[in-house]
């Protein structure tokens, strides 16, 4: 099997709000849009895709439940999380978890989109000394 594309399909009854969130905060552009769904791509290469769909449309796949906000995190890796945090906060993005340096080697902050999906904006940084050694498997 050769994939032509790969994207999450998230059921939400807040279609317009979710579309606008990704356009405003992350620069996504709708590639296909109807009153029951929107398929979006990020700018740049390789370009990442998301699709949101109304749970009551007849073309929905099995499992039409509206996303509850549980168990899904979209991670967006950036080169400078501190700069992204400052820019987003200054523009009014509702921050759910402030800028934090994690001992495993990430600088991050989190928000939620209108569909309840967690957005984890991360930068890879050096881990705390000795952090990963505790997980090393003896050979």
Image (cartoon, rainbow, N blue to C red):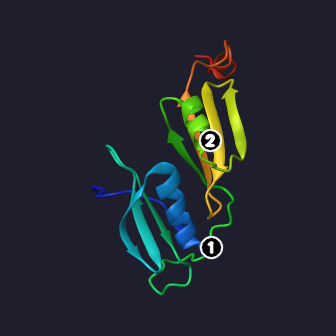
The residue singled out by tag 1 in the image is 66
Q: CA distance from mark 2 to mark 1?
A: 31 Å
Quarter the N terminus occupies: bottom left
Q: Nearer the viewer, mark 2 or mark 1?
A: 2
Residue at point 66%, 12% (across, down): 129
- Residue 30 in percent (x, y) is at 39, 64
Q: Earlier in the sequence, mark 2 or mark 1?
A: 1
Q: Is residue 34 above or below residue 108?
A: below
Q: Nearer the viewer, residue 117 or 44?
A: 44
Residue at point 69%, 59% (across, down): 70
Q: Residue furthest front?
A: 90
Q: Residue furthest bottom?
A: 58
Q: Residue furthest top?
A: 129
- Residue 77 in percent (x, y) is at 50, 37
Q: Is residue 10 above or below residue 118?
A: below
- Residue 96 in percent (x, y) is at 72, 47
Q: Nearer the viewer, residue 57 or 91?
A: 91
Q: Which mark is residue 131?
A: none
* Secondary structure under the numbered disc 1 in the rendered image: loop
Quarter the C terminus occupies: top right
Number of numbered discs on residues: 2
Q: Nearer the viewer, residue 124 or 61?
A: 124
The residue singled out by tag 2 in the image is 90
């Amino acid at each position: 099997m050769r994939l032509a594309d790969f994207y999450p399909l998230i059921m939400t009854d807040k279609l317009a709000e979710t579309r606008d969130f990704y356009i405003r905060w992350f620069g996504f552009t709708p590639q296909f849009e109807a009153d029951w769904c929107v398929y979006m791509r990020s700018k740049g290469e390789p370009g990442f895709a998301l699709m949101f769909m109304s749970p009551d449309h007849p073309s929905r796949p099995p499992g039409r439940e509206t996303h509850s906000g549980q168990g899904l995190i979209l991670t967006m890796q950036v080169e400078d999380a501190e700069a992204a945090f400052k820019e987003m906060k200054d523009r009014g993005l509702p921050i759910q978890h402030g800028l934090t340096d994690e001992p495993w080697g990430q600088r991050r902050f989190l928000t939620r989109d209108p569909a309840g999906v967690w957005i984890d904006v991360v930068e890879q940084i050096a881990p705390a000394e000795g952090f990963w050694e505790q997980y090393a498997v003896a050979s």
